[in-house]
Amino acid sequence: MNTFFLIIGIVLVIAAIADFIWTTLWVDGGAGPLTDRLSSALWAFMRKWSRDHPKILSLAGPIILSATLLMWIFLLWAGWTLVFSGNESAIVNSTDSTPATWVERLYYAGYLIFTLGNGDYAPTTGVWQIATVIATGTGMMFITLGVTYLLSVLGAVTLKRAFAESVLSIGSSAEEIVTDSWDGNDFHNVNLLLSSFSSQLSTITSQHSAYPILHYYYAEKHQESVPVAVIVLDEALTVFRFGIPEEHRPNGLLIKEMRRTTQSYLETMDISAGTLPPPPDLVKLHAAGLPTVSAGEFSDALGQLAERRKQLTGLAHASAVEAPWK
């Protein structure tokens, strides 16, 4: 018996199963250690190689997802091949009972985890028969959970882009959203939208926490970028809350809920603070006939929000998107 091959094989199989279950089933755990390192490395490589070119970065999500699935397949396949190589007579030819070669053991492990059901080779003793059953079980688990995970990620990507389009269709800047929300008397028309946006972004935040690979699904089109939408929306909320007199503001509870949802999204993205962005143009809003607070009052409020607003530039940098105030 070759104990070295057996131990290495068991380690690889356990690593694959643990990382797979961690990533696909543990909602609060984020990505598994191997998946997280692979995803981060590929994203950093693609950003450096593409120089943040939108067309190339739009391929990052599919490439990283495919690489993750291939990593799990490789670990399972290599692990079971080494396990069945732990004993020379573990796997034999079904026809003449001669011990399988390395290539034949590789073939045997492959058709087990892909559940092909071929009978060209067979295990000998009870231990290897049980190992064969377990190997088939890991393959079935991978196929079932892998497809479910894939569909969940793609569904979440669709929701992300629908949310971004909804927000940015109202306005591509905070000033535009605020201006278009004014009905001549107040901003109550935006209340229903804030409630809807808060619900959608809360769902997106939960999905980002459960499926961190969503961080790397880059939208080539500016109008489909969630980071851009979040930045624009959060800056609009800043204007609504601190730049508009209280009697004209949208519903205060909805603004508070939306701000908390946005903050949760920023925390989930785990970003570093960037530089302080330029302030929203309150003078432009006032010139358009909207009621605003004094410039000094608004400036004081922005000073207290400096760290939060720096997170917005950090989000733009981490997501490789052009900040909407440029």
Image: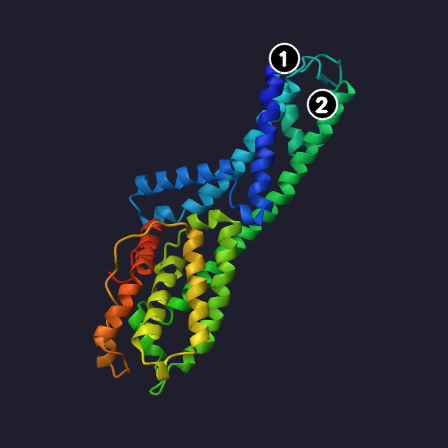
Residue 214 at x, y percent in the picture: 47, 50
Quick one: quadrant of the C terminus? bottom left
Q: Residues within 10 Å of mark 1 (few under 14, many from 20)?
A: few
Q: Is residue 289 left or right of residue 104?
A: left
Residue 284 at x, y percent in the picture: 22, 76
- Please tell me whether residue 193 is drawn above or below residue 154 in the rendered image: below
The number of callouts visible is 2
Q: Is residue 168 visible?
A: yes
Which mark is first along the chain, 2 or 1?
1
Residue 158 at x, y percent in the picture: 49, 58
Q: Nearer the viewer, residue 60 or 282?
A: 282
- Please tell me whether residue 143 is drawn above or below residue 314 in the rendered image: above
Q: Which residue is mark 2?
A: 120
What residue is rendered at 65% in x and 44% in y?
144
Q: Is residue 157 left or right of residue 80?
A: left
Q: Nearer the viewer, residue 255 or 64?
A: 255
At mark 2, the secondary structure is loop
Q: Is residue 125 left or right of residue 31?
A: right
Asked if marks 1 and 2 touch (Cβ < 8 Å), the reply is: no
Question: In which image quadrant can residue 220 be found?
Answer: bottom left
Q: Nearer the viewer, residue 128 or 271?
A: 271
Q: Amino acid at mark 2?
A: Asp
Q: Colour scheme in the image?
A: rainbow
Residue 118 at x, y percent in the picture: 71, 28
Question: In which image quadrant can residue 187 be found?
Answer: bottom left
Label ID, residue 2: 1
Label ID, residue 220: none
